Amino acid sequence: MKVDWSQAPKGARWWAVDEDGKAHWFCAPDVAAFTKFWFSEPQPAPTFGFTGDWRKSIVERPVAS
């Protein structure tokens, strides 16, 4: 299984599968000004044929060379 980062939205930093078997792209969080919390909205992603323990599915986007 290999994540195809060319399909990722701009700013996506991670790809992962949840317990229900659905995959998502995760972007770096936006920190709300003058608060102590942040927001991050996962976006649907292909599963890329992932089969395995969802707890070990997270893949970080490779650093561009």
Image (cartoon, rainbow, N blue to C red):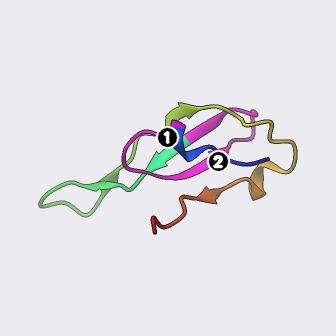
Task: Tell me the crowding category of disc 1: few under 14, some 14 to 19, or many 20 or more residues within 10 angstroms, Cα based.
Answer: many
Residue type for callout 2: Ala
Dot 2: element: strand
Q: Residue 15, position in %: x, y? A: 59, 48
Q: Are marks 1 and 2 in contact (CB under 8 Å)?
A: no
Please tell me which residue lies in front, 38 or 64. Answer: 64
Q: Which residue is mark 1?
A: 8
Q: Residue 22, position in %: x, y? A: 68, 32
Marks 1 and 2, how far apart at CA = 12 Å
Q: Residue furthest front?
A: 65
Looking at the rendering, the stretch of residues picked out in magenta corresponds to: 7-24
Q: Residue at x 20, y 54 (%)?
A: 32
Across the whole image, how many numbered discs are drawn on residues? 2
Please tell me which residue lies in front, 12 or 19. Answer: 12
Q: Quadrant of residue 44?
A: top right
Mark 1 or 2, closer to the camera: 1
Taking the image as shown, residue 32 lies to the left or right of residue 42, namely left
Task: Tell me the crowding category of disc 2: few under 14, some 14 to 19, or many 20 or more residues within 10 angstroms, Cα based.
Answer: many
Of the numbered discs 1 and 2, the one sitting upstream in the chain is 1
Q: Residue furthest right?
A: 52
Q: Residue at x 12, y 61 (%)?
A: 34
Residue type for callout 1: Ala
Q: Residue at x 80, y 41 (%)?
A: 50
Residue 16, labelled with which disc?
2
